[in-house]
Amino acid sequence: MSYVDEIIEAVTQNHPGEPEFHQAVKEVLNSLRPVIDLNEARYRREALLERLVEPERIITFRVPWVDDQGQAHVNIGYRVQFNSAIGPYKGGLRLRDNVNLSIIKFLGFEQIFKNSLTGLPIGGGKGGSNFDPKGKSDREIMVFCQSFMTELARHIGADTDVPAGDIGVGAREIGYLFGQYKRMKNCFEGVLTGKGLTYGGSLARTEATGYGLVYLLDEMIRTHGDQLAGKTVAISGAGNVAIYATEKAQQLGAKVVTLSDSTGWIYDPEGIDLAAVKEIKEVRRARLSEYLTVRPNAQYSTEGRVWSVSCDVALPCATQNELDLADAEALVRNGCRYVAEGANMPTTLEATEYFQAKGVLFAPGKAANAGGVATSALEMSQNSQRLSWSFEEVDQKLKGIMVSIYHKIDEAAKRFGAADNYVLGANIAGFEKVAEAMLAQGVAF
Ligand code: NDP
């Protein structure tokens, strides 16, 4: 049995009941086969893969809190400190009712490689709780965050583990978590990212994932002798990533013709009016259907998905598994040649393989949406130096990072005889740096 197959089997046996984690390990290790085969003897001797798939530390804890009616509740808190070979653990905290250890381990494992690709010194981690913030009052959210941090504070620190936001954890929750950490430790340090601008947050963090996605896309298109300017772009979602991807694509001369939310999607063949979308989604937090009151010639539909329109570029920026094989076939039929993932895992495996078989250039989320975590690492740098960089400085650094990520994944794909296979390139390029660091630091690290 090959080393990869042995490890996949061992993970499945040693950690039963963790399907999401098993799937992530399988997907990553399968695409690493070329590099693992090449170094098998050394990796086996050093038990590299056994160490890679086992988190350095898993912390689970009780999170007791009292609701507005005086009723006590208990949720489960998690922090998986997966790999610190190249820097302090870094990854978001997710608050959602379906959070469990398998999901946190899957996300933490993926985070190792994404963080490595940024070229910045950040290891992989993830955390959260099965607490569902929906319908909770501000006071209940604050009390939960304080209780969660009361335990988490023992395990994190600016040079140890720096959590950030994820689903259910935005600026409000980061504020409450930071306040409690500071109170407990009597220490003002960059222990969390995604902070407000008045207490150590970074300019351009809001724009970073969407802008970064388009910077990487632009570089991918240009290195293939083409240009983004003049292209028609289909984007899904109307949240943080979709809005700022639209903004940057428009700034670079592309025409964005679709956006969607969880109830329907808009098609505006003349190009999306982004000011109108920001007003609807960011200010009024309303449904996208209201777009028609501003742009009566656009179309709104609750049937199907954005991927049925004619476009050159598709940027899925909403949610997981939102682009399946039928969508991929429609996109290719209608002339789409470039796809880059803004969301995490928006494209199904079958759709990804179809794009690759048809010669569509496909940039996976691990590389394409790394602008968010990269800018979080820039927030850490600013906090360490007690400095705040201007928007332009952060944006320039972000652009440099995304261009460099593209060239890393392109080079790794070519080196292993799989030019333009950026799924393979991203996994290999992310893995190689972590593997080297783990080997250099010895086994008992
Ligand atoms: P938001 O919550 O801001 O936006 C998500 C958008 O997608 C919303 O407009 C939502 O609709 C829409 N949506 C949700 N489900 C569906 C669906 N089934 N069909 C169509 N639209 C849907 O999230 P973000 O923009 O921050 O994140 C989007 C994705 O990007 C996620 O996968 C996230 O993990 C990933 N990501 C985000 C990063 C960041 O920095 N924000 C960094 C890296 C990855 P509605 O408005 O109705 O809720």
Image (cartoon, helix red, strand yellow):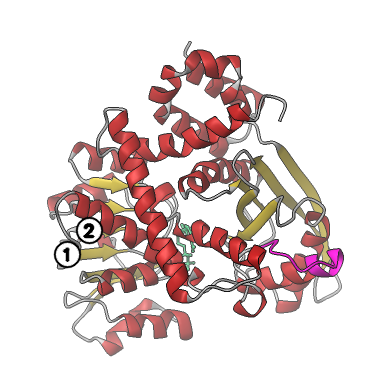
Residue 15 falls in which quadrant of the image? top right
Q: Nearer the viewer, residue 40 or 23?
A: 40
Q: Residue drawn at (54%, 19%), measured in percent from left and top?
A: 43
Magenta residues?
Answer: 181-192
Q: Is the residue 371 above or below the residue 329 in the image? A: below
The Cα atoms of the two marked residues, 2 and 1, are separated by 7 Å
Residue 400 picture location, percent across and down = 39, 58
Q: Is residue 151 magenta?
A: no
- Is 247 or 157 nearer to us in this picture? 157
Magenta-colored stretch includes residue 189: yes
Q: Residue at x 31, y 35 (%)?
A: 413
Q: 183 left or right of 389? A: right
Residue matched to label 2: 313
Judging by the rendered image, the residue that carries numbered circle 1 is: 231
Residue 44 percent location from the top left of the image: 56, 16
Q: Is residue 356 left or right of residue 180?
A: left
Q: Quadrant of residue 135?
A: bottom right
- Name the residue type under label 2: Val
| Mark 2: secondary structure | strand
Are discs 2 and 1 less than 8 Å apart at CB?
yes
Which residue is the extreme one toward the top?
Answer: 1
Looking at the image, can residue 22 be seen? no
